[in-house]
Image (cartoon, coloured by chain):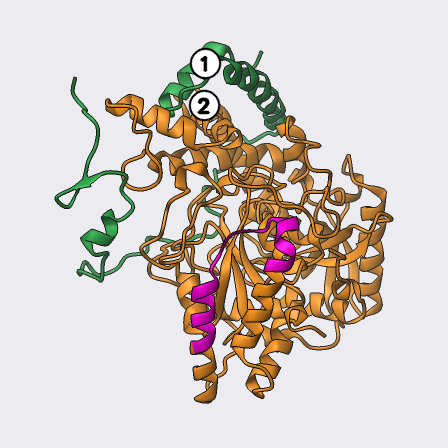
Chain colours: A orange, B green
Amino acid sequence: MKLHELTIHAAHQLLRRKEISSQELTRAVLDRVGAVDDKIGAFLTVAEESALQQAKRADEQINNGQCLPLTGVPLGIKDLICTQGLRTTCASRILENFVPPYDATVIRKLKQAGAVIVGKLNMDEFAMGSSTENSGLQITGNPWDLTRIPGGSSGGSAAAVAADMCMGALGSDTGGSIRQPAAHCGVVGLKPTYGRVSRFGLVAFASSLDQIGPLTKNVTDSALMLNTIAGHDPADSTSVPVEVPDFSAFLTNGLEGTKIGIPKEFSATEGLDDEVRAAVERAVEVIEDLGAQRVKVSLPHTEYAVAVYYVIAPCEASSNLARYDGIKYGVRDRAQDELMSMYRRTRSKGFGPEVQRRIIIGTYCLSAGYYDAYYGKASQVRTLIMEDFKSAFETCDVILCPVAPTPAFKIGEKVDDPLTMYLSDIFTLSANLAGIPGMSIPCGFSADGLPIGLQMMGKHFNEAKLFQVAYNYERTTDFHMQKPKI
Amino acid sequence: MKITKDEVIYVANLARLDLEEAAIEKFVGQIGKILEYVDKLNQVDTQGIRPTSHAIFLSNAFREDKEQEHLDRELALANAPEKEAGNFVVPKVIG
């Protein structure tokens, strides 16, 4: 096996036994980026110099007998997580030149653990999108078929992991932005419970929905990354002071007594592709064969999730993105000598069409006379969606369903039809609205050779159960071992 | 139409965006379609349902009112498009 193909766990074993050095490993990963990223376009910034310095320090740390699970491991970071001294653009023209003066809490934790940061990864601008086509900076291709989208908004993160350009990556998930690209690229993606991971230093899109999580080559690596980044942070008042278990302790055999809930609404979803339906159904059968018990559950308000989300998320975004005014950071239109016209020109030139569309929707839904009809109503239906999950979880431990209704679509196919694009988020949005954890794991391939993902959703703060079910399923399959030919 | 051209222009102004004529036309159609779709929420009876703004209940997260480590002034200004004497520079506010 080539070094860049290693999983985090396998690389850790070799580093710990000093069979390889972090510098060799990081060099191999950087060479891989050099060899294939011209075709894929996952990286917005490759941090070669600082990565090699971090690798050198990691090697010193290992020589001093300290080798934590991520020490010396090269990782990629979605470009909306602040990295001190390393450009962080949110894939937006308006932040094209932004160099954060501090590290996000998750980055500080990764650095403390000795991880190596290889670079910053492409995404939909400000995480608004499902295909990474809304990046204001570049297009990213799906490593399995370069004419197709890698998913989004963490498309660069998923593509980079799938193409072995980093051993794992951080993404963020507001409505499916980790799970959906993970499914489309054939990797494991985890959106933790809201409040499990600090959002300090994560550029805000929709603050009541955003959550940082890992994209990895397998379930074991996902647990190792969550172990490192989870925990309460006084700098994020929405992070929750609950105990963080050692998630790798739940990677054990056996699913006896586990109840898996299958929502009756999902199979009737309009637009659900036959191959996806069949792959998910087969996965459910495999999980039953491993000892889990299938129960039927109902999530009757799921059909309203898209409508709720596309009110709440734009409302929060329109408020969050008011900060980009050409004064404190980012790009300013210097042709304007009057404040108001400077604001307007800076924002109009800096934001791409999808971001402007969502700012307008959000501003409209929050404006006088419309607030109750849109934001108020959506917030009430959000309560009903949460209650659906609460009653479903009275009879089951984990809910299983597809991640995306179809495998990855063609680049350009949906760009002019935002509503159709939004509807493809149907299976992932509710977890964000309810704040529960969700995971995507590879569960098959379409006839065209495109990866398909299985989604597991769990109770608040019970990522452990997701890891247990996912680990047992993964052990019996080899979908996660397949590699795209680039 | 669910949203008119004038409303798009009005809202764009509130959001400090300048839209070109072609973009306005496009947004009227696209946003209109999205808002029509969102209208399906009216099928749900929400009488007496409390709204949710956060999925995880937390009461106020207080801390002691003590000075903590903070960004150095130069660093805080490092990304400013224009700065002078330790301050952000803005264009003329009053004409």
Give the chain letter at badge 1. B
Please indicate whether residue A59 sits to the left or right of residue A345 in the image. right
Q: Is residue A276 visible?
A: yes
Q: Is residue A69 visible?
A: no
Q: Amino acid at mark 2?
A: Tyr
Identify the residue shown where x is 60% and y is 47%: A176
Q: Secondary structure at mark 2?
A: helix
Of B64 and A397, nearer the camera is B64
Range drawn in magenta: A34-56
* Residue ID for mark 2: A364
Q: Quadrant of residue A233?
A: bottom left
Q: Secondary structure at mark 1?
A: helix
Identify the residue shown where x is 62% and y is 63%: A32
Circle 2 Cα neighbour tier, 10 Å, few/some/many (<14 / 14–19 / ≥20): many
Q: Quadrant of residue A266?
A: top right
**Within the magenta stretch, is there residue A65?**
no
Give the chain letter at badge 2. A
* Residue ID for mark 1: B7
Contact, mark 1 vs mark 2 (Cβ under 8 Å): yes
Identify the residue shown where x is 49% and y is 26%: A361
Q: Amino acid at mark 1?
A: Glu
